[in-house]
DNA sequence: GACCGCATCATACGTAGGTATGATCGCGGC
DNA sequence: GCCGCGATCATACCTACGTATGATGCGGTC
């Protein structure tokens, strides 16, 4: 259960962090200086192991990753990060890449795939796109997390009632369905509205949709 | 205004159509026979012009496209088709492609990007993925189109009321907002429910969300 | 054992939603 | 000019929703 994100004002205008993973110290250094020159923070890693072992920032950012890395390949690292729920957008670099490799990376959700040598501007454009994608993703995740935090304050019964109510059932139908009196359903329903921080059923339905919780999915549709 | 799709049973188990665009007649022929061997229908074109001039099937399908084509390039054709609202998933082939080309194609939504020569199985796998994506897209589009068709039977006033109601306003609030009596709002609201084919407000809210119509987006949220 | 949160239900009251009946008005078409 | 449709509103009635008050019971915790 997290604190509501929506209330947090933009504390620091902290620019984003670019996580650089490359085994070539020269490349690391030049990317580092490139990104710092445009006001971005950086974190440098020489291998996937370092990255996975080290602490990642939890602010906005993206990863710039060489495909050919000691130990795990960049593509494997990509899927590994996805599995671990680390969702920084990834930009790949490669010195000796081929088309299948780039296609595989893009299919797996990479933002871009640049061949070395690349123009600084191309890298900056890619990073800009990646940070935009990250910001978008963070905004959605924050909203959803707020809703989930509210949902978690509900008791089991309240969640059950919420599911049926947002599916469009009347209080009496819910009552019959789960073997309660209507008045009890009304009480649970009232609690749900209060705990979920909504005043209208419409808003509750939207939050339920965001959570993916609606019991009866039968189509009342009959044109 | 289209007829509701949801009522249509799967009439024919008609397999999908693969649209092949390549200037090499030999390639066209061998792809044609490959796809037919697995029960797919085909349409052959030697150039983008032919494709844009000819009539496209409107059933499920996908496009297999050479990047290097007489006239327009495959990538240009891709964006052209997107602009025209033709949304068949695209698989690219190329004899002399490079990484930037493949990345650009994938960014623009291509399903796959195969280098010639490719293995038949790789092409078939790509087509399978493309047809899956197309089916998914079609299902969503059909559902949305049904809802839009219902929405278009609404009068201007009814749409206005629907927008406010699905935003969570009470009848009397809607009435005050647009200068009507509450009873009139109720009548419009009833008409909306009937015409939209829903019995509960919850279902109406979901359809409104699918359409993107909700007037007041103020946050009644106050945890 | 006392306390608390959760769940359950009854009664009661006030508000909101929904529909039927009937009526008026304006606009565009035949 | 008549008709149909949409829009408007009134009265009336019924159902649904929401909450307050009060009460009981159960399973944990301090």
Image (cartoon, coloured by chain):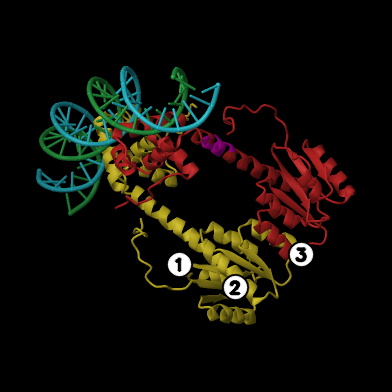
Chain colours: A yellow, B red, C cyan, D green
Dot 3 crowding, Cα within 10 Å, few <14, some 14–19, many 20+: some
Residue carrying label 3: B98
Answer above or below: position of A160 versus A92.
above
Label 1: element kind? loop
Rendering coords of residue A16 (x, y %): 49, 71
Answer above or below: position of B85 versus B102.
above
User: Does mark 3 fall on the same chain as mark 1?
Assistant: no
Task: Specify the farthest residue to the right.
Answer: B26
Label 3: element kind? loop
Tell me which residue sits at (82%, 62%) in the image: B96
Q: Main secondary structure of the magenta part?
A: helix
Which of the chains bears the disc numbered 3?
B
Label 2: element kind? helix
In which quarter of the view is residue B106 placed? bottom right
Residue carrying label 2: A124
Q: Judge whether residue B143 is colored magenta.
A: yes
Which of the chains bears the disc numbered 1?
A
| Numbered label tally | 3
- Cα separation between marks 1 and 3: 36 Å
Tell me which residue sits at (52%, 70%) in the image: A53
Residue carrying label 1: A58
Tell whether label 2 touches label 1 (CB within 8 Å): no
Rendering coords of residue B53 (x, y %): 78, 44
Residue A80 vs residue C26: left or right? right
Q: Which residues are magenta?
A: B142-148
Dot 1 crowding, Cα within 10 Å, few <14, some 14–19, many 20+: few
């Amino acid at each position: 259960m997290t604190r509501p994100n929506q209330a947090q004002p933009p504390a620091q205008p902290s620019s984003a962090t670019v996580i650089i993973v490359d085994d070539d110290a020269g490349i690391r250094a030049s990317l580092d200086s490139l990104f710092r020159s445009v006001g971005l923070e950086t974190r440098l890693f020489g291998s996937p192991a370092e990255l996975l072992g080290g602490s990642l920032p939890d602010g906005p950012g993206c990863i710039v990753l060489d495909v050919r890395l000691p130990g795990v390949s960049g593509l494997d690292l990509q899927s590994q990060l996805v599995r671990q729920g680390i969702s920084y957008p990834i930009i790949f670099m490669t010195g000796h890449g081929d088309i299948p490799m780039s296609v595989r990376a893009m299919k797996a959700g990479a933002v871009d795939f640049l061949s070395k040598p690349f123009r600084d501007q191309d890298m900056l454009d890619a990073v800009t796109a990646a940070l935009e994608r990250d910001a978008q993703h963070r905004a959605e995740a924050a909203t959803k997390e707020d809703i989930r935090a509210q949902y978690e304050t509900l008791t089991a019964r309240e969640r059950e009632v919420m599911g049926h109510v947002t599916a469009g059932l009347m209080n009496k139908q819910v009552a019959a369905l789960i073997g309660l009196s209507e008045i009890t359903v009304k009480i649970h329903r009232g609690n749900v509205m209060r705990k979920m921080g909504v005043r209208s059923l419409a808003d509750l339905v939207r939050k339920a949709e965001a959570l993916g919780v609606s019991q009866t999915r039968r189509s009342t549709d009959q044109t």
